[in-house]
Amino acid sequence: MIVFRVPPTAVERVGFSYSPTLEAVLSLHVLVEPKHHPVQHEWVRAMRRLSPALKREIDVFAFAYRAYFPEFFFPSAAGELLDFEGELRRLRSIDPELARLEFATPSIGPSDAVVAALLLDDPGALLERFLTLLEDYWEEAFAREWERIEPDLAASVSEAGRQIESDGLYALLRGLWPEVRCDAEQGRFWLDRPHDHEVQIGADDRLLLAPSTYVWPHVRVNCDAPWPLGLIFPASSIVREARPRIPPAQLVSVLRALADDTRLRALRLIAERPRTTQELAPLVGVTEAALSKQLRALADAGLLDRRREGYYVLYRLVPEQIEALAPSLGSFLSPAED
């Protein structure tokens, strides 16, 4: 378990960022583990057009991002937002020994013999080969994707900042359940991971929060120096896209009432003119008792009005409910707006 201790009032210890190289690496994880990322299957299908050579290189380095990814891709804690070229310059300055440690962390190491040899003998060359993979991937596909998603990431930073300002850090963290669990009263949050570590975010430390388009449904965490302490969490637009939409109760009631051939036949006859149970039963071909039950279901859904005329109960269609059905269903089926 990884535990972070942050006082609920320590808003000044929280920073935000996002990163093009981080998103590129997380999108590569999606390509090698698509079953975990149903909201990104459109991207997976689109990436079938990648060149065969690039696909092979993505497979060669799959060990580096299938379950873990090198933590030197965490955005800078200084709050600077570098472009892709700027991040590559930063990454090329990493100590080769640190690169070796990061590439060696995954439990399943490289299966390619050349890559395995580089890991042991020349981690600097291994890092350069990996960054060359990212450059090729960026040029073929991800530069256009970054143009699309960067505004959403910026909006997520603004939205998360407003939430923290309004309701506190732990209100944001509660929205990351069940990946993140928290106890605001004790000033701590934690993640179940095969790694035991407790981190105290002190006055001189910063907790970095980075929204991501490609991390859902997970979060990524770093708790070890020299990389920034922090969380990568799903961008708000992706959370909304993945959240199941609940149909209005009235729409469900009407559709259930209509999902029966006897009720539909009775409704068709009532649409011609108001009718009684005694009149409808022989026309529909059921007993009066059975038909009364069906008409009651249609009336309960608001599709029929009933009024008594002496001994008889007369059923009348409520046309407004029928007219509202298509717009209500269409509104529910239309793409959700942010």
Image (cartoon, grey):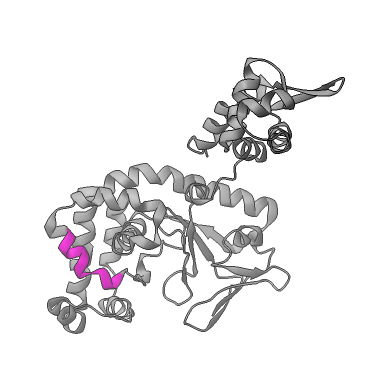
Looking at the image, which is closer to me, 83 or 48? 48
Report x, y in % for residue 20: 34, 54
Report x, y in % for residue 174: 63, 62
| Relative side of 181 to 125, left or right | right
Q: Quadrant of residue 69?
A: bottom left
Residue that appears at 66% across and 58% down = 171
58 in the magenta segment: yes
Residue that appears at 43% across and 42% down = 151
Seen from this angle, which residue lies furthest top? 273
Vertical side of 306 occupied by 14: above or below: below
Vertical side of 249 occupied by 53: above or below: below
| Relative side of 13 to 228, left or right | right
Report x, y in % for residue 318: 69, 22
Query: What span is in magenta?
Result: 55-64
Looking at the image, which is closer to me, 197 or 15? 197
Residue 81 in sight from this viewpoint: no
Looking at the image, which is closer to me, 52 or 5? 52
